[in-house]
């Protein structure tokens, strides 16, 4: 009885320790929501826009959290695989104790009734108590633990690869929207210059009309062209604001109008193309993401290959029981307190071998499904390589054409400027009409817009080439040099 009491007290102390001594760390481990950075005080450069996007865009922050989760899941999976199952339990039950010899499958509705019973039926309740623990450990499983941990690692690799691909996509999109905003900014400048030219021309026309040298209709036509140029300026400013808002969204500052600092980018029409060599397609983030998908499918198949083996389970435990019923011999009454506090100790150790031999049918069927998914993932990888090869050819053509267009645009602008000057001179000499002057000025404005589009188009083409290489660092380095050159 002395041994059972000590065992009982030790068990209760352990139960109390494990239930109260382990603090909850769930709230402490949660990271605070990351506040979005405030809008920068000064206009952003091309590199600055890309940096803001990589730091603030919510989709990237979301995937970064997913990567951290999948990385932590590797440790969690190791704990799940190798940590023994352990359970402590304590019960107090009041019930009758009439027994009947029979065989039933275990059920929570039909509790077992161990021990001797009465010779006749009794409805008087008896109190029963029990407490104990069990440890169930299955360290030997012929590689299944390792395969499941490998699957968790494959999930982490896939999450990391997807993050790298998203980082590239967001960076390219931020750079592209910056260049779009630059084009809109140049269009505003051209529209403002066009308004200024029509204002000057309208002044000349009104002076000649007032002096009786020209008909009054010319003044009305000049005013109409001036109003039209102002409308073009309003539309250009609207497009600029829309582009600024779009740029602010991709850098994680949605709801603002983000101003830009282009520096000398608009004037550098032949930046160095340090990425003109053939890219290594297999190291591109898109290819790495598709390869990680294949590895994940292969990891799931490896789990299936390790499932058709016996499972060896080592079990060990101890328990205490108590009852107000007579003891096992039937001639010694148990103390009344044992109905609440168990006092009779027992221990147990054992080995169980489980072999679900009929699972072979399920496993083979699942392997057929996984094999097809592996094949689909492999084709997805091949498709990604084909896509990158095609984009590389297209990017090379874009760069060549963009450089040639940018080189030819100054000739067009100079000719359009000369034509506009000559048209106004001819009008002042009485050899041209207001409509001819307006047409010449509009051609000049269109030529200057096309020049800006062509100059920015060189950078857009180089951005396409950088995207195919999967690395924007050389492109951004060239952009920084061009930006500094213009300051």
Image (cartoon, rainbow, N blue to C red):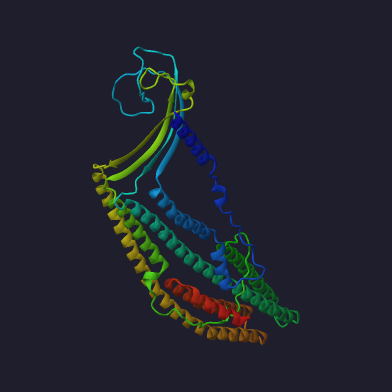
Question: Residue 438, how many percent across, how many down?
Answer: 62, 78
> In the image, 133: left or right of 13?
left
Question: Residue 125, how many percent across, how many down?
Answer: 44, 17
Residue drawn 59% across the image and 87% down it: 418
The residue closer to the viewer here, 482 or 73, is 73
Residue found farthest to the right: 211
The residue closer to the viewer here, 31 or 191, is 31
> In the image, 220: left or right of 321?
right
Question: Residue 423, how many percent across, how many down?
Answer: 61, 84
Instruction: For residue 443, say whether it is visible.
Output: no
Instruction: Tell me: residue 362, above or below residue 172.
Output: above
The residue closer to the viewer here, 398 or 78, is 78
Instruction: Tell me: residue 364, above or below residue 97.
Output: below
Instruction: For residue 340, say whether it is visible.
Output: yes
Instruction: Tell me: residue 258, above or below residue 29.
Output: below
Q: How many marks?
A: 0
To which quarter of the image does residue 42 belong?
bottom right
> In the image, 111: left or right of 446?
left
Query: Where is the N terminus found, in terms of image quarters?
Result: top left
The residue closer to the viewer here, 286 or 3, is 3
Question: Residue 328, how many percent across, how many down?
Answer: 36, 22
Query: Where is the C terminus found, in terms of image quarters?
Result: bottom right
Residue found farthest to the front: 2
Residue drawn 38% across the image and 54% down it: 149
Residue drawn 49% across the image and 65% down it: 167
To which quarter of the image does residue 325 belong?
top left
């Amino acid at each position: 009885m002395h041994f059972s009491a000590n065992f009982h007290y030790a068990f209760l102390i352990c139960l109390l320790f494990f239930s109260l001594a382990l603090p909850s760390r769930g709230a402490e481990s949660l990271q605070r929501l990351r506040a979005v950075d405030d809008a920068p005080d000064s206009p952003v450069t091309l590199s600055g826009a890309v940096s803001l996007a990589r730091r603030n865009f919510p989709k990237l922050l979301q995937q970064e959290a997913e990567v951290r989760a999948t990385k932590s899941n590797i440790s969690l999976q190791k704990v799940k695989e190798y940590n023994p199952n352990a359970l402590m339990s304590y019960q107090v039950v009041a019930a009758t104790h009439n027994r009947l010899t029979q065989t039933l499958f275990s059920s929570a509705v039909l509790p077992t009734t161990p021990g001797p019973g009465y010779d006749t039926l009794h409805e008087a309740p008896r109190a029963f108590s029990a407490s104990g623990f069990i440890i169930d450990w299955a360290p030997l499983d012929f590689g299944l633990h390792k395969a499941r941990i490998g699957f968790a690692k494959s999930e982490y690799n896939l999450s990391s690869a997807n993050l790298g691909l998203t980082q590239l996509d967001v960076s390219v999109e931020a750079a592209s929207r910056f260049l779009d905003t630059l084009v809109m900014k140049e269009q505003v400048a051209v529209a403002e210059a066009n308004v200024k030219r029509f204002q000057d021309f309208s002044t000349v026309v009104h002076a000649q009309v007032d002096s009786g040298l020209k008909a009054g209709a010319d003044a009305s036509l000049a005013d109409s062209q001036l109003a039209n140029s102002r409308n073009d300026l309003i539309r250009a400013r609207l497009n600029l604001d829309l582009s600024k808002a779009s740029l602010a969204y991709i850098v994680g500052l949605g709801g603002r109008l983000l101003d830009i600092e282009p520096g000398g980018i608009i004037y550098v029409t032949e930046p160095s193309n340090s990425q003109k060599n053939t890219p290594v397609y297999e190291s591109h983030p898109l290819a790495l993401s598709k390869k990680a998908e294949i590895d994940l499918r292969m990891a799931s198949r490896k789990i299936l290959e390790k499932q058709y083996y016996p499972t060896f389970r080592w079990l060990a435990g101890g328990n205490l029981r108590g009852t107000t019923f007579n003891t096992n011999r039937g001639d010694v009454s148990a103390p009344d307190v044992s109905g609440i506090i168990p006092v009779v100790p027992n221990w147990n150790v054992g080995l169980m071998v489980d072999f679900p031999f009929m699972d072979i049918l399920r496993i083979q069927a699942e392997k057929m499904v996984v094999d097809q998914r592996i094949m689909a993932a492999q084709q997805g990888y091949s498709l990604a390589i084909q896509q990158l090869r095609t984009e590389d050819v297209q990017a090379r053509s874009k760069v060549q054409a963009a450089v040639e267009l940018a080189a030819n645009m100054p000739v067009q602008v100079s000719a359009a400027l000369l034509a506009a000057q000559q048209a106004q001179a001819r009008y002042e000499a009485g050899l041209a009409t207001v409509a001819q002057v307006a047409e010449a000025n509009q051609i000049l404005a269109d030529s200057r817009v096309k020049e800006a589009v062509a100059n920015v188009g060189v950078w857009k083409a180089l951005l396409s080439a950088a995207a195919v290489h999967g690395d924007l660092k050389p492109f951004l380095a060239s952009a920084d040099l061009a930006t500094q050159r213009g300051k």
